[in-house]
Image (cartoon, rainbow, N blue to C red):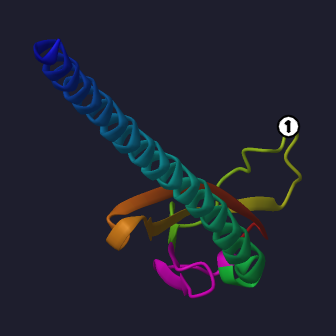
Amino acid sequence: MKNQQGMVLFFSLIVLLIMTVIGVAIAMNATQSLRMSQAGSERVQANIALQGAMNTVVINNEGSTLANLDDPLILTDLTYNVTSTLTPLYEGDVVCARSARPTAGIECRKVELSSEIQFGRKDLAQLTRVSGLEQEVLAD
């Protein structure tokens, strides 16, 4: 009878050890899942900030700024922490791509808008978006 009580204690310790290992594994898995969801959330926030900064650049520079752009223009948006670059694509005017029937005397200046944002832990991740713009101008 005394030998059996020692065996029960031994098996109880083994079961307790197994349960502890399972509990630690579950806790580590939960921690990893939280980190992954936080990284996904940061990426979504960066994407929204990037789009907001691009919209701001277009609104603030439409018209004569885009029409007279000869050299790349680098802009930093401190609100969103985004760096944007406006680069003219062609020298001179070209036919507007969005017009099915171009208006006589109206052509377009094409500009590339490239924006990038650093995000994540220690700003190690980077998201870049490139878009094309057309500014209508009077033909020469």
In the picture shown, does residue 20 fall above or below 92? above
Q: Position of residue 107 (x, y in %)?
A: 75, 59
Q: Position of residue 18 (x, y in %)?
A: 25, 26
Amino acid beneath label 1? Ala
Screen quadrant of the N terminus: top left
Left-right relation of 87 to 24: right
| Residue identified by numbered label 1 | 100
Residue visible at 84% across and 61% down in the picture: 105
Closer to the camera in the image, 82 or 73: 82
**Magenta residues (range):** 66-84
Q: Position of residue 93 (x, y in %)?
A: 64, 62
Residue visible at 21% across and 30% down in the picture: 13
Closer to the camera in the image, 86 or 28: 28
Left-right relation of 17 to 66: left
User: Can residue 110 be seen here?
Assistant: no
Closer to the camera in the image, 118 or 25: 25
